Amino acid sequence: MSGRFVRQSSFRHVFGTAEKQDKSYTSINVTFNGDGNYVAGNGKFVAFAGKGGGGPVHVLNAEKTGRVPLNAPKLNAHKAKVLDFAFNPFNDNLLATASEDCYIKLSVIPDGGLTQNVSEAAVTFSGHEKKVTNLRWHPTANNILTSVSFDRTVKLWDAETGSEVLSFDGFDDTVFNVDYNRNGSQIAVISKDKKIRLYDPRTTDAVTTITSHEGTKKSSVFYVSKHGYVGSVGFTRSSKRQIHLWDPRNIGSKPLSSTDIDQSAGIFSTYYDHDTSLLFLAGKGDSSIRYYEITSDAPYAYFLSSFSDTQSQKGVAFLPKTACDVGSCEIARSLRILRDSIVPIGFKVPRKSDLFQKDLFPDSYAGAPALEAKAWLDGGNEDPILTSMKPGDQVRAKVEFTAKKSYAELEAELKKANARIKELEAQLGK
């Protein structure tokens, strides 16, 4: 029998297609700060950091594509450049922003988008001593937000009150970023000291410590939920970009798999799709987005293909799965930010049938919390709530958000009230 063996996969022929100019966001006035993705989005909104005093953030109605007006309304909640932003996974209208001013702000975006400039945030998170560089929402617990700062700490916050609930410190160098496993029972932290630390995020003691990439440029960490791995993307000592995969159940001196990508200086934006086990890598300054399939068989990371363009990207962010066009077999959708435009990219699998393709679309993340913050902080764990991806069968509960006063605010009000009571008592005494 002659011929080459071809590995069976539903995703071998995935291809990326860029939207036309009229379906993109053009003439944007953007500033590129820090090492973040520079763009974020969901099914309703697209956000990016704009130019100007303080830290303006543009939030666009996702349906209103084309030329963005120069005087478009924006958020002006910060006093310095905004370095990262993240939409709440359970409420499309909640946007968290992190800034060089050391604060994190949570803003409520009205349905339909901004109609005027907004300078007051719904909640302010205060506690970091240096600029805040990375944000991550908990995947299953409502109102838990995680932040990374140049002060070498990782903090967990209660978004309703803006109060800090836990702080991880003691890192020997700059913390790059964090990721949760799929049910949020574990968190991975990667830092410049060339280590990955795995925690139960409700304690500050590391469960496992892994020696990661030899290079000192920014690395990213991610969980491969389908196979129980921890992955990282970083650099060798000679500046080669590479992928590492680790099995936390059997940590050795070497990774389970190590894949060299190329010799380039661009930091990767990393996205792992828990449904398909595809890993998307978009290097800053690259004109392509690579994608790999992660499997349980050696060599574990199989290169599939790449989307290529003539223009280099500044950053890439992927949208929730519910934003994909299931009818055209679109398995992933991203926002690719260029010098003066944001271009949506759809990744599709070619299929002749117009029937629902169940092998491409298993039940996916529904965007609803599986438990409340207190239950999770008390030690509870719940798997994420899933929904069918079949058109007409998708279910997503609407989660309301009400900002509560923090303990500090309540104490200040109580102090003020007590002072007023003493003042009135003194008047009565006279």
Image (spheres, grey):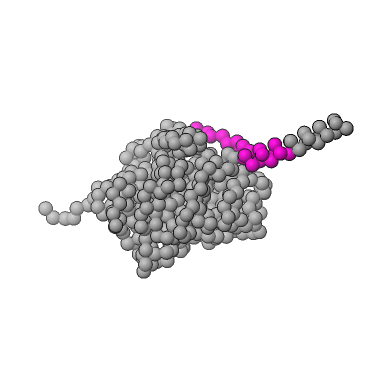
Q: Give the range drawn in magenta.
A: 396-416
Q: Name the foreground residue: 34 vs 7.
A: 34
Q: Can residue 272 be seen in this view?
A: no
Which residue does the image show at 83% across and 34% down from the upper left?
Answer: 426
282 displayed left or right of 146: left
**90 w.r.t. 292: above or below:** above
The quadrant of the rendering that contains the C terminus is top right
Residue that sits furthest to the bottom in the current view: 238
User: Number of numbered discs present?
Assistant: 0
Residue 341, x across and y down, in percent: 53, 57
259 displayed left or right of 412: left
Residue 164, x across and y down, in percent: 55, 44
Which residue does the image show at 55% across and 60% down from the upper left?
Answer: 33
Residue that sits furthest to the front in the current view: 429
Which residue does the image show at 32% across and 53% down from the upper left?
Answer: 245
Q: Name the foreground residue: 408 vs 345.
A: 408
Residue that sits furthest to the top in the current view: 428
Q: Can residue 235 be seen in this view?
A: yes
Residue 321, x across and y down, in percent: 43, 43
**391 w.r.t. 200: above or below:** above
Q: Name the foreground residue: 72 vs 300.
A: 300
299 displayed left or right of 152: left
Residue that sits furthest to the left in the current view: 1
Q: Is residue 402 magenta?
A: yes
Q: Is residue 224 magenta?
A: no
Residue 101, x across and y down, in percent: 61, 56
Residue 264, quarter of the rendered image:
bottom left
Which residue does the image show at 16% across and 55% down from the upper left?
Answer: 3
2 displayed left or right of 181: left
